[in-house]
Image (spheres, grey):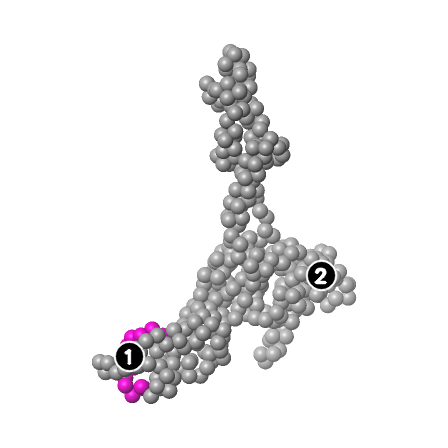
Amino acid sequence: MGKKETKDKKPAQFKKIYELLSKYTQVIIVGLANVGSKQVQDIRRILAKKNALLVIGKNTLFKKVLATRVQELPKEHEYYEDLAKFGNAIKELDALKNSVAGKVGFIFTETPVFDLKPIIEENKVETPARVGAIAPIDVVIPPGPTGMDPASIQFFHALQIPTKIEKGQIQITKDFVVLKTGQKVGQSQAVLLQKLGKKPFLYGMEVLACYDNGSILNKQQVSVNLNDIVAKFQQNVRNVSAVSLANGWVNEASAPYLLANAFKDLAAIGLQSGFIFDQIKQSSAPTTSAPVAAKVEEKPAAQQAPAKAEEPEEDVDMGGLFD
């Protein structure tokens, strides 16, 4: 019965994924390793408020839909009447095929991945160390009481954990490394952590990559802070402007400052000679100014000008379902 119900849902799932691939130009690929169903539902509700839709299904189905969407839909296709309305093939989606691997989910949204990534990854849950799991961090038990009675002392001795009996309970006497990062959790380690009531691992969704209108941004690229990029770009523009002004080079970075300085020189001459032209009246130029020769000599001031000016910021355009 379960298999029949799943088979009956496949046409609807196929059509839905096809529609989403047609509608959205951005798809965020998230890793779901060790993520529980409750976590999935929680993040799904959060994403819905951000106009983002999380889809989790079988990779074989997603690959099948993807292969269909990158080609022109033949009239003999079994779902032609339902899918033809979504238009021509989107060949750029072929870049997404290599990301459909492992335990992953797909978030369809037009909200920039840089805005959603912190929201997606902040939802983490403490999880016990299960046998066979790979430790994502070092697990160390610090010295102190265990809350266990002396009857269990042999268990600690078998694991070579330094202990002593104090106030009727077992006490660990120094740091004991249970697991190292990348180590597989064994039976004894899992039992030990369970006896101590430890849930050492934090698991949650992880942004692995992002498809953006034909391009794939990898894990490192989606982790970039856009504010840092803009700040560095602005600083570099100011540096170029300062060097250009110091050497008398005319380019896009220095031209605005050269024009501004030239106007100030003209304004200084006009104010000194009593010739007040319309631009002086309309500007906020100071009522007194040094002579032209004096201003020309003040090259350090000219070099400082770019640091005080604000450069315009350029907009950067980053372009329970199934489970």
The answer to whether residue 314 is visible is yes
Q: In which quarter of the image is the N terminus?
A: bottom right
Q: Which of 261 and 48 is in front in this view?
A: 261
SS for dot 1: strand
Q: Residue under label 1, please give it.
A: 171
Q: How crowded is mark 2: few (under 14 residues within 10 Å), some or many (20 or more)?
A: some
Q: Does the magenta stretch include residue 145?
A: yes
Residue at (48% x, 76% y) in the render? 183
Displayed quadrant of residue 144:
bottom left
Q: Which of 306 and 90 is in front in this view?
A: 306
Q: In this view, does 16 lie to the left or right of 294?
A: right
Q: Which amino acid does label 2 sit on?
A: Val
Residue at (37% x, 87% y) in the render? 158
160 lies above or below 201: below
Q: Nearer the viewer, residue 210 or 295?
A: 295
Q: Earlier in the sequence, mark 1 or mark 2?
A: 2
Image coordinates for residue 240, horizontal then vertical, percent: 57, 38
Residue at (56% x, 36% y) in the render? 243
Q: Residues within 10 Å of mark 1 (few under 14, many from 20)?
A: many
Q: Residue under label 2, please give it.
A: 70
Q: Quadrant of the C terminus?
A: bottom right
Residue at (66% x, 65% y) in the render? 97
The stretch in magenta equals 141-153
